[in-house]
Image: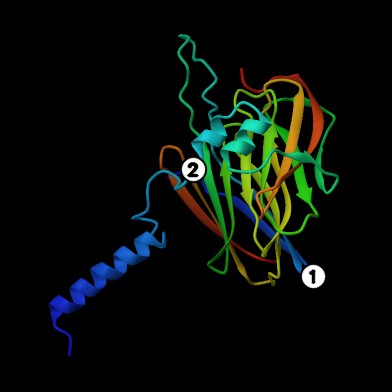
Amino acid sequence: MPDPMRIRAQATGDRTTVRVLMSHEMESGQRKDAAGKTIAAWFIQEVGVTLNGKPVLRTLWGPSISKNPFLQFVVKGAKPGDRIGVSWVDNRGERRSDEATVT
Amino acid sequence: MHTRRELMTCTVRLAGMLAALGLLPGLAHAQAAHYPNAAFDAKSLADAVKALGSAAPVESKDVSISGADIAENGAVVPVGLATTLPNVKSMLLLVEKNPAALSAIFEVNDAIEASFTTRLKMAQSSNVYAVAITADQKAWFAVKEIKVTLGGCG
C-alpha cells in the first residue's frame, strides 16, 4: 500500500483552498540505470477529487509531474466540516484514497 | 414475495449497472479509464491540443501562467495556471521542450475554480504553456519562458 497523502483544505468565505501532497516516485521513463537500461515509467495517471462524496475534479497526468506530486486547487461552496476526498491511480494500477475535513 | 433466485439476479444486475457507471472502484479497470495516450505522447502544443479534438490554440490574455523566471532545479518547478474565460471545460499544462509536451489535464466544472498549482519536471529551459479549452472546443493559451539551471530528466 502506498504512503498516505497529506491533504489540507482551508475555507475562506465561499472559497476553499485545497493542497494535496502525494507520495509517489513519478519515474519519467527517461532515466537509465547503472547498466544503461531505461527505467520503466511509473507515474500517477489520474487524480480524482470528491466533495462530500460527489466528484468535483478529475485530472490526468503525464510522467512530467514532479516526484511526490503537489496539487493545489480551489473548491467553491464548501463549508467547514465538509469532507474532501482525493484518490489517485498510477500506470501500474496501484491506487490510494485519502480524506480530509474542511477547516 | 421475492424468491432467493430473483433477489440474486437483481443484485448481479445492479452490480453490473454500478460497474458500468464506474461506481464500484473494485470492478473498474486497473488503468485509468479513458487515458488519452495520444495526447500525452504528443511532441508539441499543437499536436496535443489536436489529439484532444480542439481547434488550433490562440493566445489569450484571459489565460494566465505563473512561476519563477529561473528554476534552479528542473526536477521541481512550481507552476500555476488560471483563466477567467467563461465555459471552460478543461485546462492543460505543457512544456515545449520536454520529451512529451503535455504534463497535465485538469477537467474543470462548476464546483471548481479554473486555477491550479502543481510542480513539474523540466528537461531544459523552455516555454511552458497553459491552455484553456472551452465547451465549444476552442483552445486559448498563455506562455511563459522558464529557465532551468539543472535539468530534471537525467
Q: Residue furthest top?
A: A35
Residue B15 location, quadrant: bottom left
**How busy is the neighbourhood of tag 2: few (under 14 within 10 Å), some, or many (20 plus)?**
some
Q: Which image quarter is the C terminus of chain A in?
A: bottom right
Question: Residue B129 location, x and y as percent?
Answer: 74, 35
Q: Secondary structure at mark 2?
A: loop
Tell me the subunit letter for badge 2. B
Residue name at image x 17 percent, y 78 percent:
B6
Q: Residue A43, relative to residue A87: is it above or below?
A: above
Q: How is the image coloured?
A: rainbow
Number of marks drawn:
2
Q: Amino acid at mark 2?
A: Tyr
Residue name at image x 48 percent, y 50 percent:
A96
- Tag in front: 1 or 2: 2
Q: Secondary structure at mark 1?
A: loop
Residue B87 visible (yes or no): yes
Residue linked to disc 1: A13
Q: Nearer the viewer, residue A30 or A100?
A: A30
Residue linked to disc 2: B35
Residue A65 location, quadrant: top right
